[in-house]
Image (cartoon, coloured by chain):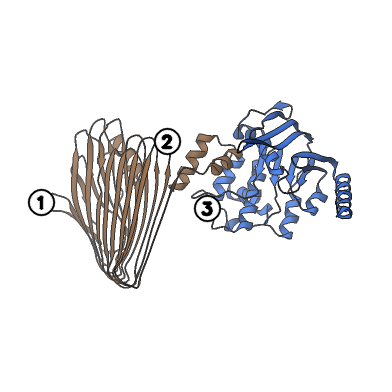
Chain colours: A brown, B blue
């Protein structure tokens, strides 16, 4: 499949791909599904109503990957897709999603992803978002709904890599006994970007676990609001951690909330927001970096 | 060679002005280890931070290899060849030890080359090279890596602020081996074994130079001063 230069650049940014990869793939560009390819263990099909795709990962899938990148490079496209993932018992799969927008006008993408994760299945989900180009209203609103059966596990890495003017990011999960959800989120905003992040995780099963780590950097006049709601309804362990670096006139609000609905629920949260520690800048300057290089290096490490 | 000329450092303490350093003039020679010592609060670390540009002197001049560096920034001084190892190492999130060695040496080191710097401070390099330089490392590990970064910088003038703090005797011997011929070393220390190792000692008392010269002479004077004080008591 031939890709234009903008699509190639966006693919590289969101999925570290230089071309459409082998294996299970769904590639969507400017509101149209351009390529769907299944493999023996990962079946991808279009929904009958055209609203998105269904991805069925069979139990026989062990350590295979599925890529579902989205590219929006035309002005005026506001794409909305509903993708459902059915992960069978015991499957082990890595799903690389993400959306790149490049426009000189308004453009956006709302990806509503719903995961049905079977018992003992192991899912690694990577989702990267970036917006480039001179457009002033580049919008990305990812929604992730997760239903986790007994002893399943999911590691979710979500990154908003910059340039997104407005984003409302929602993640909701329900964990049954022994299920484990690990979330690592990284957000970079600048200019007048506004990003809202909202997690709601309900742990209904015994020995379920959830760990949410969010790291964010806000520059310029940008605003970020981080909200998390961790609810323990059984003997479970939950922790949420939100660290932010604020530069210039930016704002970060962090509202971590934990709710115990069972006396054996163990829940904790921590939030730390502040500027870059001056002694870190000084240390890197003693090694020869100038102030701007030192700040960049510290932010790069913080968001690594 | 590093020269300090009439360095003063004063701070505002509520409504009054407090003098931290008063009229410090001193020459730190190349191919020489100079120890700066004195009681707590005598101005040792302040003086070295002024040399590195971390603090600005109220007045006075600093010359490095004949060049006036008084108004230069920290990084400009670092690029000229001044290096600073902190008393309390400063850690980072997400930056590996290898990355810091590369920054310090201003090159993309091969793994064996980067490991050499760590081996010099007595740590098993392969276990550390891709670790983040963060608070999961023990104080002793942080301290050794701090010293390794100073070595990797390859400066003409290296400042160690209490390098022996937090490291054991075995590491101290390694530390002693770090001093290379031809370079200017400035070491802030209270430890007699380091003072004995030094070629020269600068003794500070209440922000002033109380004594400066060959280490044996200054140590003799320090002993006499201590004996006199004991007799007075």
Callout 3: chain:
B
- Specify whether B226 is left or right of B135: right
Q: In whole angstroms, how far apart are the C-alphas of marks 2 and 1?
A: 47 Å
Callout 1: chain:
A
Is any part of residue B183 visible from this angle?
Answer: no
The image shows a total of numbered marks equal to 3
Asked which quadrant contains residue A44, the reply is bottom left
**Sequence-earlier tag: 2 or 1:** 1
Per the image, label 1 sits on a secondary structure element best described as loop
Callout 2: chain:
A
Circles 2 and 1 in contact, beta carbons < 8 Å = no
Q: Is residue A235 above or below residue A190?
A: below
- Specify whether A297 is left or right of A215: right
Asked which quadrant contains residue A57, the reply is bottom left
Asked which quadrant contains residue A220, the reply is top left
Q: For the point 89% across and 50% down, which residue is it?
A: B224
Which one is in front in this view, the residue at disc 2 or the one at disc 1? Answer: 2
Q: Are marks 1 and 3 on the same chain?
A: no
Where's residue B193, x and y in %? 80, 54
Per the image, label 2 sits on a secondary structure element best described as loop
Per the image, label 3 sits on a secondary structure element best described as loop
Which one is in front in this view, the residue at disc 3 or the one at disc 2? Answer: 2
Q: For the point 17% across and 50% down, which residue is it?
A: A52
Which one is in front in this view, the residue at disc 1 or the one at disc 3? Answer: 3
Where's residue B46, x and y in %? 68, 41
Residue A18 badge: none
Q: Which residue is mark 1?
A: A49
Location of the N terminus of chain A by quadrant is top left
Q: Which residue is mark 2?
A: A248
Where's residue A86, x and y in %? 22, 62
Q: Which residue is mark 3?
A: B132
What is the crowding at mark 1: few (fewer than 14 residues within 10 Å), some, or many (at least 20)? few
């Amino acid at each position: 499949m031939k890709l234009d230069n903008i699509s190639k650049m966006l693919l590289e940014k969101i999925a570290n791909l230089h071309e459409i990869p082998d294996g299970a793939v769904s590639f969507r560009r400017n509101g149209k599904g351009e390529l769907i390819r299944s493999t023996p263990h990962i079946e991808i099909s279009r929904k009958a109503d055209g609203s998105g795709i269904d991805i069925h990962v069979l139990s026989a899938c062990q350590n295979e990957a599925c890529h579902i990148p989205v590219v929006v490079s035309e002005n005026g496209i506001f794409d909305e897709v509903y993708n459902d993932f059915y992960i069978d018992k015991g499957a082990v799969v890595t799903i690389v999603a993400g959306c790149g927008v490049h426009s000189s006008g308004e453009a956006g993408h709302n990806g509503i992803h719903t995961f049905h994760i079977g018992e003992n299945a192991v899912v690694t989900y990577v989702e990267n978002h970036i917006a480039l180009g001179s457009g002033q209203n580049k919008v990305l609103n990812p929604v992730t709904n997760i239903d986790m059966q007994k002893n399943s596990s999911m590691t979710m890495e979500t990154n908003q890599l910059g340039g997104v003017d407005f984003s409302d990011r929602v993640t909701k999960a329900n964990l049954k006994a022994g299920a484990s959800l690990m979330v690592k989120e990284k957000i970079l905003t600048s200019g007048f970007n506004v990003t809202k992040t909202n997690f709601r995780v309900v742990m209904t099963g015994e020995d379920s676990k959830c760990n949410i780590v969010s790291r964010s950097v806000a520059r310029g006049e940008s605003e970020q609001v981080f909200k998390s709601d961790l609810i323990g309804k059984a003997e479970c362990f939950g922790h949420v951690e939100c660290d932010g670096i604020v530069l210039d006139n930016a704002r970060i609000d962090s509202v971590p909330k934990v709710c115990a609905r069972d006396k054996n629920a163990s829940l904790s949260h921590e939030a730390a927001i502040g500027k870059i520690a001056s002694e870190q800048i000084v240390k890197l300057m003693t090694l020869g970096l100038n102030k701007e290089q030192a700040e960049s290096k510290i932010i790069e490490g913080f968001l690594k | 060679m590093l020269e300090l000329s009439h360095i003063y450092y004063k701070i505002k303490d509520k409504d009054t002005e407090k003098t931290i350093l008063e009229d410090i003039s001193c020459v730190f020679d190349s191919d020489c280890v100079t120890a700066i010592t004195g009681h707590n609060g005598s101005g040792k670390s302040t003086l070295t931070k002024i040399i590195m540009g971390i603090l600005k002197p109220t007045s006075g001049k600093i010359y490095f290899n004949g060049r006036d560096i008084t108004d230069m920034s920290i990084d400009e001084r670092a690029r000229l060849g001044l290096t600073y190892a902190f008393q309390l190492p400063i850690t980072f999130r997400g930056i590996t030890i290898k990355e810091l060695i590369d920054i310090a040496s201003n090159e993309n080191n091969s793994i064996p080359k980067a490991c050499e710097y760590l081996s010099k401070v007595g740590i098993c390099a392969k276990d550390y090279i891709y670790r983040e330089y963060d608070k999961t490392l023990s104080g002793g590990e942080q301290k050794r890596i701090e010293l390794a970064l100073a070595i990797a910088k390859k400066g003409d003038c290296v400042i160690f602020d209490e390098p022996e703090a937090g490291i054991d005797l075995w590491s101290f011997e390694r530390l002693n081996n770090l001093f290379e011929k031809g370079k200017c070393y400035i070491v802030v220390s209270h430890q007699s074994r380091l003072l004995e190792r030094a070629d020269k000692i600068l003794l500070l008392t209440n922000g002033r130079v109380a004594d400066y010269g060959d280490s044996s002479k200054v140590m003799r004077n320090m002993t006499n001063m201590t004996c006199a004080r004991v007799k007075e008591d």
